[in-house]
Image (cartoon, rainbow, N blue to C red):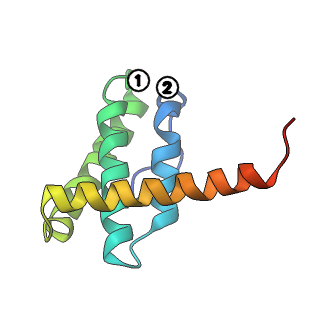
Amino acid sequence: MTKASPRIPPELHSINAFIRHADKLGNDDPESRIVAHYCRMHAAQEGMLYATSDEGKQYLSELLDEVESEMDAVSIITPEESYILCRNHADRIFEKADAEDKKRKFW
């Protein structure tokens, strides 16, 4: 689970999926760690638009501290390589969901 508060404030519900996916990926291997970092970074950027309460701002502060602490670990590859890793990860998720949909008959 993320070091930031485990309970995401209601005003930040739009970042919940990114935080949970980052937590699910964990830090077991370098690729997962990088993808999780970018999920958290995206969540922090999105959250800045919606954090209005003290609780929301505190959550984002903790999340940003976590993103900052990960910078050294993920800086071992270039932004372009990070993009490719994240894109490949997203493609795998899509392909898995697409295969599940094709197994079911909706019509």
**Residue 87: numbered disc:** none
What amino acid type is highlighted by mark number 2?
Answer: Glu
Crowding at mark 2 (Cα within 10 Å: few <14, some 14-19, many 20+): some
User: Vertical placement of 64 versus 11: above or below?
Assistant: below
Query: Mark 2 and 1 residues: CB-CB less than 8 Å, in contact?
Result: yes
Q: Residue at x 41, y 78 (%)?
A: 28
- Residue 7 visible (yes or no): yes
Q: Quadrant of the C terminus?
A: top right
Q: Nearer the viewer, residue 1 or 53?
A: 1
Q: Secondary structure at mark 2?
A: helix
- Residue 1 visible (yes or no): no
Q: Nearer the viewer, residue 16 or 9?
A: 16
Q: Nearer the viewer, residue 56 or 45?
A: 45
Q: Position of residue 104 (x, y in %)?
A: 82, 50
Q: In which quarter of the view is residue 76 placed? A: bottom left
Q: Is residue 37 left or right of residue 78?
A: right
User: Vertical placement of 55 versus 103: above or below?
Assistant: above
Q: Is residue 5 left or right of residue 99?
A: left
User: Vertical placement of 92 versus 8: above or below?
Assistant: below
Q: In which quarter of the view is residue 49 placed? A: top left
What amino acid type is highlighted by mark number 1?
Answer: Ser
Residue placed under numbered mark 1 in the picture? 53
Q: Nearer the viewer, residue 29 or 92?
A: 92
Q: CA distance from mark 2 to mark 1?
A: 8 Å
Q: Is residue 101 left or right of residue 11?
A: right
Q: Position of residue 43 (x, y in %)?
A: 37, 41
Crowding at mark 1 (Cα within 10 Å: few <14, some 14-19, many 20+): few
Q: Residue at x 27, y 58 (%)?
A: 84
Closer to the eye: label 2 or 1: 2
Q: Secondary structure at mark 1?
A: loop
**Residue 11: numbered disc:** 2
